[in-house]
Amino acid sequence: MIKRVLLALVLAVVTAPAWAQGPLRIEITEGVIEPLPVAIPAFVPETPESADMGQQISRVIAADLVGTGLFREIPRDAFISQISDFIAPVQYADWKAINAQALVTGAVNVSGDTVTVKFRLHDVFSDTELGDGLQFAGTTDGWRRIAHKVADVVYSRITGETGYFDSRVVFVSETGPKDSRRKRLAIMDYDGANVQYLTGSEAIVLAPRFSDRGDRVLYTSYETGFPRIYVLDVGSVQRRVLESQQGTMSFAPRFAPDGQTVVYSLSQGANTDIWSMNISSGQSARLTSAPSIETAPSFSPDGSQIVFESDRSGSQQLYIMPATGGEARRISFGEGRYGTPVWSPRGDLIAFTKQSKGRFHIGVMRTDGSEERLLTASFLDEGPTWSPNGRVIMFARETQGAAGRSTLYSVDITGRNLRPVRTPEGGSDPSWGPLQR
Amino acid sequence: MIRTFSLKPAIVLFAALSLAACTDPSRFGDNVTSSGPLDGAAGLAGSASDPASPAYFQQSVGDRVLFAVDQSTLSPEGRATLDGQAVWLLQNADYTAVIEGHADEQGTREYNLALGARRADAARAYLVSQGVQASRLQVVSFGKERPIEVCSDEACYSQNRRAVTVLAAGLTG
C-alpha cells in the first residue's frame, strides 16, 4: 500500500513528464515539465468551528504546490465527488474522470487554541494512498506552518526531494524614494506571510544573513554612523554589535555552518579584505591580504571552503579559497562582472549576480565554474539566496529610474517559474532560512 | 495509519517579542551620518559670505569630488577642489571632517561599499598629503545607499559617484 518513490536529482537528464503512467511522481529535471494536476478539496471540519480553518489550510497547501510550478490545481467546481468524510473510501473513478493525478484529503479539528490536521495523499490512477496518513498538531496561530508542513510532505513524496515551504526569510523592508530610502530588517514566511519587523528604520540596515539553524541573524547597520556588524537572536530579538577596530568599516557578514565563526569584509583605508571572527571570543583573523577589494564571502556547506568576490584581476570575479585563508582559485571566466556568490545547500552550485552589457542577471555555476546558467535578466537583479532544498533562488529586483523600487522575486534553478514574492513594502537582500523543525 | 507530530510553538513567542525590537535612536548619540540630511547641506553654521563658515566651505570651496565609473582615481578637477579643502581645513583648525564615499547604483551592494571606501580614502589621503592632520579626518562609505540624484542615467550617476567632506566642529573647547 505504501509506494516509496525515490528519485535522484539528475540535472542533466531531460525527460518527459513521468506521471502520465506508472507511479505518481515528478522528476525535477531541466526538461519542460507539464504541471501535475492535483485536487485539494477543503479539509473536512470535524467540528463546526473548524470549517474556516479547513478552507484556509487547503488554500495554503494549494498555493505552496502551485507556486513551485510543478503542480496545477484542478478547480473545485470541476469536482464530481466531494470529500465530506476523511475516513470514508475515496471514489477514485470520480477523480480519474477529471484527470486528478494526485488528491490531497484532510480533516481539521480546532479545539480552543489548538488545531489538529490529518491528511492523506492519494495516487489516483493507482487507486491507492502514497505513503501513510499523517497528523500534525499545533496552535491555531501557527496554522499556516501546519499547512506548509503538509505541503512539504506532499512535495517530498511526489518529487523525492525535501520540501521548503515551512521556512522563513529575513530581508530588508524598504520604503521611500531612492534618495531618502528607509530600511528596516524584517522576517517573514517564505511566501511573504507573517511579516514581522526586527529593527526600526532610523539607521541604514543591510544584508541580513540567517545562521544555518535559523536562530540568529547577522546584519550590517549604520547605527553608529559607520557600518558595523550586529548579531540578532531571532527568538528574543536581542542584538549586539560585534567587535570592530576603530577607524574601520565592517560589512557583508555570513555565518559558517558551525554557527560560531563569522566571515565578513573589513575596510581599512582604501583596502577591503575578508576576515573571520569567533563570535563568542571576538578573536579575529585575516583571510585575504591583497590590495584589491575582497568581499561577499560565503561558506561551502561542509565549512571547508569560502567562495567570495574580488577585483584583483581588474574586475569583479568569483574565487574559492580554504576556510582558513590561503591560495584562492578563480572560478568565473565569462564575459562581464560577477559578485555576491552564495554556495548552494547541496554543495554543488554557486549562485551569483552577474553584470554584463548594462544588464544584471542571477545565475548559477558549478563550483569549478563550469555550466554557467543565467536564470534572470533585468535592469538590476541582485543578491541571490537559496531555498533550503537548493531548488529555488530568491533575489531582489530593482526597477529603473527615479521611481525605482526594489521587490523580492523567486526563480527555479532551471530558470523557470519566475515570480514576485509579495511583501507589504519594497524588499531587498533576502536570506532564506532552514526548514523549520 | 496516522502518525502524529507536534509543532513547537516558537512562532507565537516570536510575534509577541518583536514589538520590542524597534531601535531607540537616542541610544546611539549623534548619528550625524546615518540619518537626516546627508552631504552636509542643512544645518551648517554661518553665512556663505564668511570664509570661515562651513557654508562657505561647502558652497565656495566645494565639499565634493566626483569619480569616473568604477574608479577611485582623483581627477585634476577633484585635486583642485581638495587643494581648496586642505587650505580651508588648515586655516580652520578646530574642524574635523568625515569623508563620505558613494557609488552609483550600477553595482552590487557589497562591492559598492568597498568602492565607496576607496573613493573616500583617495580624498582623505590627498588632504593628508596637503598637510591636513590625519587625526582630523575619518572616512565612511555608503556604497549605493544614498544617491543624491535619482534618475538611472549617466547624468545622475556622475553626481552620485562622489566623495563628500562633511565638517564637524570637533576640536573646539
Image (cartoon, rainbow, N blue to C red):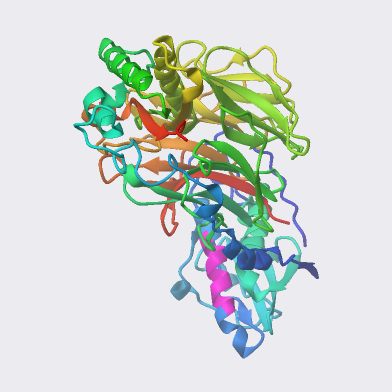
Q: Is residue A82 visible?
A: no
- Dominant secondary structure, magenta: helix
The residue located at (50%, 74%) in the rendering is A79
Q: Position of residue A296 (x, y in %)?
A: 56, 29
Q: What segment carries the magenta color?
A: A53-63
State which quarter of the image contains the C terminus of chain A. bottom right
Q: Is residue A195 above or below residue A255?
A: below
Q: Position of residue B108 (x, y in %)?
A: 44, 30
The residue located at (49%, 51%) in the rendering is A184
Task: Using the image as rendered, state which of residue A150 and residue B166 is in the foreground.
Answer: B166
Q: Farthest residue to the left: give it.
A: B49
State which quarter of the image contains the N terminus of chain A. bottom right
Q: Is residue B72 visible?
A: yes
Membership of A3 in magenta stretch: no
The residue located at (57%, 60%) in the rendering is A101
Task: Using the image as rendered, state which of residue A64 and residue A18 is in the foreground.
Answer: A64
Left or right of residue A425, residue B62 in this image: left
Task: Using the image as rendered, state which of residue B134 and residue B20 is in the foreground.
Answer: B134
Q: Is residue A274 above or below residue A144?
A: above
Q: Is residue A120 above or below residue B36?
A: below
Q: Position of residue A175 (x, y in %)?
A: 38, 53
Q: Is residue B158 above or below residue A380?
A: above
Task: Using the image as rendered, state which of residue B91 and residue A192 is in the foreground.
Answer: B91
Q: Position of residue A257 (x, y in %)?
A: 73, 37
Q: Farthest residue to the front: give it.
A: B173
